[in-house]
Amino acid sequence: MIYTVPPRIARLEGDPLGSGKEAIVVPVVQVEGKPSVKGILERINEVSNGVISKASDKGVFRGDRGEVYTVPLEKAIVYLVGVGKEPSDDSYRRALAKVAKSVVDKHEEVVVVLDELEEATASEALVGFLLGAYRLEYFKSEKKSKLRTIYYSGSIDEAYVKAIAEAVYLARDVANAPPNDLYPERLAEKVRELFSSLPNVEVEIFDYDRLVREGFGGIVNVGKGSKYKPRLVKIHYKGGGRKIALVGKTLVFDAGGIQVKQAYTMTDMYADKAGGAAVLGILWAAAKLGLPVDLYGLLGVAINTLDGEAYLPSDVIRMWDGTKVDVGHTDAEGRLVIADAIAYSAKELGVDLIIDLATLTGAAVIALGPLVAAIFTRDESLKEVFMEASEKTGEKLWPLPLVDEYKQLLKKNARLGDISNVGGRWGGAITAALFLENFTHGKKFVHLDIAGPGIGGGEATSIAPEYWPGKHAPGYGVRLVLEALRKIIG
């Protein structure tokens, strides 16, 4: 991986209580306001002289979702974690993530007891535990995380759990990396190095000279003001079947360009590459799981800092497909970068569906808050697929409209060119989506504006699902899009 390797997972053979492992995690369902004591919980209650029953009678432990209660035994510590009175895949994910945060710094080995669960729910529970255990400690002098191996009892889809954990860890690592470590050239080379280990995957990197030569005006102009020149990374997973492109906004850092952001709005802009990070995770999981799809990932990687070469408001940029774009604002840069990649996908790669993920607009966050992404598409069946995937994965999503009348705002704001990269103050998420649609050249299109949940942190920290990594970007979109792809390709 880039920085963080998930803990190893292995099936536990034999009795968890006799395993010799020092930590055992048991999810507990609540029934009539009390923990349901059955199965292994009956035995734990017995060998602990009724500790669980006493805690229940006194109201100390009820089995509420995320409630953690510790039972010390002679040879092990048992962590009971409540999943609530209406258990679901997401309540198990959230509960197991909560307890993982309690044990990751304390134990090298943990047993997670999943015997009572069906395979699909048990798999999601273990995914939750792994996501809760994530720590990006590569850049710290002192590393506190101890957890190395997670043993599980019961039945899970081990290949799925491993692939999802690796994919989300990868997305989180990339999204949260500091720009001085993962600048465009280094990010591109890291991706080549990492994905070269996978079968049926090819990585092609377009360097700055090639981008200039082949007319990728959006990517070039946004990134040319930085000493770290932009790159276009193309990843091709050859799984056969339908051709689909995933395009990810990958601004290694978004300073705003000449129209520089105010300092307080710039703090989290290292995560403006969360869309591209998610694309990497999706491709990784798709290749690991051998999904039957011909999948392209395109990352326009840039930093829009400023020097004498930086692009200017009122510049007219010739995009890769020939469209002339007036620069109405240099901080509306993400749409320029991914528009080139979208057009390239549509016209050069011959895909029939383009899905983009982008931390694109503050307007989407104002409309939907920090936990919910916006989906834009004209295809009702695709919208339904993504909404169902959202419900299953817990990655929240809500549809916003593509209002045709608003296209005129992009044209009216263009002083000399064909369209402007901004449509005015109102409906900013919609006009940004319409700008991108202009470059799809009639191909089916799904645009995910993940500006809120993609970046995370801030106000989201105290209300986010337990499997989010605190103040860091959570790798939003990996599980959502992967689930949608599995439905799309059948």
Image: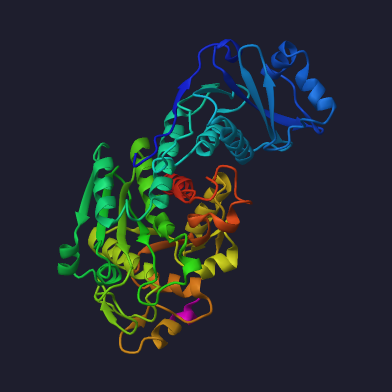
* Membership of 405 in magenta stretch: yes
221 sits to left or right of 246: left
Figure colour scheme: rainbow
Q: Is residue 175 above or below residue 142?
A: below
The residue shown at (39%, 85%) is 411
Q: Where residue 150 sits in the image (x, y, percent)?
A: 49, 25
* Residue 393 sits in quarter: top right
- Please state if 251 lies on the left or on the right of 12 as rendered: left
Q: Main secondary structure of the magenta part?
A: helix
Nearest the eye: 229 or 158: 229
Tell me if I can see residue 357 in this picture: no
Residue 70, located in which quarter of the rendered image? top right
**Image quarter of the N terminus:** top left
At 61% from the left and 12% from the top, the residue drawn is: 75
Viewer-nearest residue: 2 or 369:
2
Residue 114's spot in the image, x, y percent? 59, 24
Q: Residue at x 78, y 16 (%)?
A: 50
Magenta span has 187?
A: no
Is residue 113 shown above or below 311?
A: above
- Looking at the image, the residue that sits furthest to the right is 57
Q: Which of the two residues, 354 or 47, is positioned nearer the viewer here?
A: 47
Q: Residue furthest front?
A: 141
Q: Nearer the viewer, residue 71 or 16?
A: 71
x%, y% of residue 201?
A: 25, 43
Location of residue 108 with respect to 297 vertically, above or below:
above
Horizontal side of 169 relative to 48 (left or right) equals: left
Q: Is residue 192 visible?
A: yes
Residue 299 coordinates in the image, percent (x, y): 31, 57
Q: Which residues are magenta?
A: 402-407
Q: Image quadrant for the C terminus?
A: top left
Position of 29 relative to 392 (above/below): above
> What residue is rendered at 59% in x and 28% in y?
118
